Amino acid sequence: MDNIKLYEINANYVTYLSSYETHLFQNKKAGQKNERKYIGIVLHINGFDYFAPLSSFKDKHRLMKEGIDFIKVKDYAVINLNNMFPVPLSETKYVDIRRERSALPCSSSSGVSLYQINPGKDLEERAECL
């Protein structure tokens, strides 16, 4: 797999899916100051496209080992393939992180770009096993 390409999911699509998928968070709830963006990767598996969201790296992730469904992107983010969901490509928008670094859940003031990080394992192969 080449460098990670990140995508944002249309907020209306997430709202639609959240009524069927309980693990999805609403983009914005009443009284919530900021809107949650779904930023992650798109995997093509068996003729279907799936979105696997990025999560911010937390201290607990340092102790966790990578597995078939859990991938660390250095110490900047994690991808939990158990949280992936189907997505039509028409509901995705490519995120150029060189321009939109502050939009990422794993944005860093260090200036490190996820665009340059290759996880080194075939994510689609891992996702197919789930």
Image (cartoon, rainbow, N blue to C red):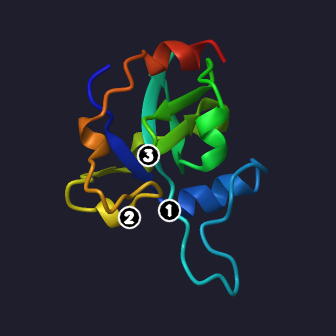
**Which residue is at the front of the view, 58 or 115?**
58
Indicate which disc residue 76 carries: 3
The earlier-in-sequence mark between 1 and 3 is 1
Measured in 3D between alpha carbons, the distance from the residue under mark 1 to the one under mark 3, in whole angstroms, is 17 Å
In the image, what residue occupies the spot 66% across and 52% down? 17
Figure quadrant of the N terminus? top left
State whether residue 88 is above or below residue 104.
above
The mark lying in front, picked from 1 and 3, is 3
Residue 29 at what x, y percent from top left?
Answer: 68, 77
Residue at (66% x, 18% y) in the render: 130
Q: Position of residue 28 (x, y in %)?
A: 62, 74
Lower sequence index among marks 2 and 1: 1
**Residue positioned 54% across, 78% down in the render:** 34
Left or right: where 90 falls relative to 78:
left
Q: Position of residue 50 (x, y in %)?
A: 52, 33
> Residue at label 2?
103
Q: Residues within 10 Å of mark 1 (few under 14, many from 20)?
A: some
Taking the spot 43% from the left edge, 38% from the top edge, the residue there is: 41
Does residue 33 appear in this view? yes
**The residue under label 1 is which amino acid type?**
Lys
Tag of residue 37: 1
Local packing at callout 3 (Cα closer than 10 Å; few below 14, some 14-19, many 20+) is some
Asked if residue 32 lies left or right of residue 8, the reply is: right
Which amino acid lies under the numbered mark 2 shown in the image of this protein? Ala
